[in-house]
Image (cartoon, helix red, strand yellow):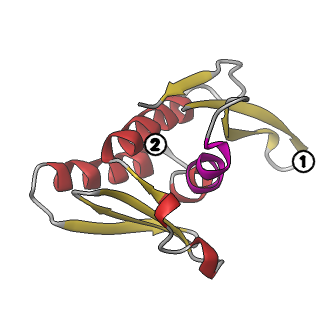
Amino acid sequence: MELKFYYVAGGIYPNVGRIFHAVAEVSPGQDDAQRYELYVCSTLGAIAQIPQQCDRLLRAITLVEEGAQVSISDGANDVLLNIDSSGVQVDILVNDDWVGQPESKFTLQEWRMVLEQWKYLLQLPKGSDEVVMVKLP
């Protein structure tokens, strides 16, 4: 699976000036694209809007990997990540059909890679034309 992270111009606003939005999407032609688009790409902007939020989630994954915690639930804006040694269960709480689904379970390694690269994008200057590619196992 390959994901692509980049910035897109969001317009000019009188009080703040030019704004940019961080975008996550599945690269074209990928198998299982709908699953990754819904449970990974569409949730990143809700749970990790700044690098510090990525750090918090990465710490949670590390605590579970090292056995310091059995499980951790974390998230924001109606998205909950349930992290345990079996992986990361992504629940989108606004729709009962998007909670507890087998297709919303990912490995710890996948979410670590996603969060590390999303954080990298968020640390780039706003408006950067750099595209961050994430190749998941």
- Left or right, 118 with respect to 64, comes to right
Which of the two labelled residues, at mark 1 and mark 2, occupies the earlier sequence position? 1
For the residue carrying disc 1, how many other residues have a C-alpha within 10 Å: few (<14), some (14-19), or many (20+)? few
Q: Quadrant of the N terminus?
A: top right
Please state the extent of the stretch shown in magenta in the rendering.
32-42
Depth order, front residue of 72/135:
135
> In the rendered view, would you say 97 is above or below 85?
below
Q: CA distance from mark 1 to mark 2?
A: 26 Å
| SS for dot 2 | helix
Q: Which residue is mark 1?
A: 14
Q: Quadrant of the C terminus?
A: top left
> In the rendered view, would you say 15 is above or below 121?
below
At label 1, the amino acid type is: Pro
- Left or right, 48 with respect to 54, comes to right
- Left or right, 60 with respect to 54, comes to left
Is 37 within the magenta?
Answer: yes
Q: Which residue is mark 2?
A: 51
Q: Which label lies toward us, 1 or 2?
A: 2
At label 2, the amino acid type is: Pro
| Residue 22 image offset from top left, x and y in percent | 67, 39
Image point (64%, 55%), residue name = 38
| SS for dot 1 | loop
For the residue carrying disc 2, how many other residues have a C-alpha within 10 Å: few (<14), some (14-19), or many (20+)? some
